[in-house]
Image: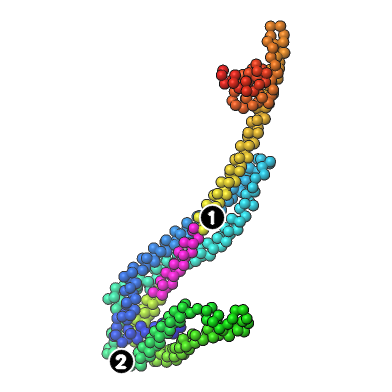
Amino acid sequence: SGRKMLANVNLPHSLTAYRQGGGIPEELWLRVEEFQRENRLAKLKQELWELRDMAELARTTYQRIVSQLDFDIDSDKLFRKENPGFEGHDAEEVQRTIRLTLRNYDKLLGTAQDGDSVLMKRLEQLDTNPKYKLLQFKKTQLDRLFPGPGDDQGPRSTMDTSHLSRLLVELSTLFNDRDSLLNTLKEEYSNFDVQATILSRVNPKTATDQDYQESLEYAQKYFDDLFRALRSNVKKQDGLVDSILEENTQFLVARERNSNLQSGDSCIVMIEDAIEEIGRLSTHLKEGADFYNVMLPKLENLQHQVGDVSARLAVERLEYDDRAHRARQEEKDAMMAKKLSSDAAGSAVAADRPGGSAQSNVDDAKVATLVAMDFDPAKVVAALSRHSNNVDAALNDLLSS
């Protein structure tokens, strides 16, 4: 753009510095003063450290999710190895979608991390690069870096800069006109109903592609005047910039005879470069913060999702383990009942002998049922024997004893 081409040759600051006879150009000082007033350098450092904290939190959350997923896989494999009959959900299959999402997040975080590293390196330069230190100088200090053209070198030789000044004023007016045209174009475009304009000229039921194309071209003509004005403005700008650069060449030749002016130009370049660099840093910081403000909630939601999946898998294993334990206990109780029943049968045979008492055989299943209620096995057998295997009567007997 025209502004960038002028900045590359230190215009208009070098001309302003020359015309005011020394000291930092007023327009440049106003930018430095605004920078100092807003304490932008300190805020920038703070924002950089906040970005680093957000990046670290995002990476930590990511690692926790990966660790939980890996732990669930290992737990599932170990449980299946110890319990071959387990047919619950496969952890790897359940995690398939989650891991796919996680891989996408990893790529995004990797790209962001590379950008963060660059920002951190640039942060270090804020404390070491001299151009950033210039932004912290007082006006009196900066004025001494921009001596007048006659300082320490005898009388000042005057250059006629009136023509260059007029050209710069004319170009500035063109810039303002173009900005106004662009704002008008944006406003007109936002308020313009393209669809309504097209439909006002075609019948949707009978219109052909050619009809729509012609209607669209008609709608575009609404902006023709603005586009013509913009093209004319840019054309004038190109011619003015060429004239300014040619005039500035003669100005630079005259200035090269004075080393003080050259050192002032060097300071202008450093200050402007520092301000622009900090502007770019601020933009990158905002983009980074916006990224993590979106990414962190996504990672937190994924972490909750992984936690829920992990809990369901664990509950499934616990339920299987509980069922297996109860099955083993029932088998153990049945064996105990069978043994007690066998002992009771032996007692019944002994009772048939002289001096013994009659006793009936007890049912193993009924013994197991009452033993499962935490009654003493011997008392269960005795109660069932007394009540001829009547569970309800035996239970009342046991409860009353």
Q: Which residue is mark 2?
A: 158
- Which quarter of the image is occupied by the C terminus? top right
Residue 109: percent from left, percent from top: 53, 62
Q: Which residues are magenta?
A: 275-297
Q: Main secondary structure of the magenta part?
A: helix
What residue lies at 42% left-to-right and 61% top-to-bottom?
Answer: 50
The quadrant where residue 400 appears: top right
Q: Nearer the viewer, mark 2 or mark 1?
A: 1
Residue 352: percent from left, percent from top: 72, 10
Residue 359: percent from left, percent from top: 69, 14
What residue lies at 61% left-to-right and 42% top-to-bottom?
Answer: 317
What residue lies at 59% left-to-right and 50% top-to-bottom?
Answer: 70
Q: Earlier in the sequence, mark 2 or mark 1?
A: 2
Left or right of 331 in this view: 122: left
What residue lies at 42% left-to-right and 64% top-to-bottom?
Answer: 48
Could you tell me which secondary element the residue under label 1 belongs to? helix
Q: Which residue is mark 1?
A: 302
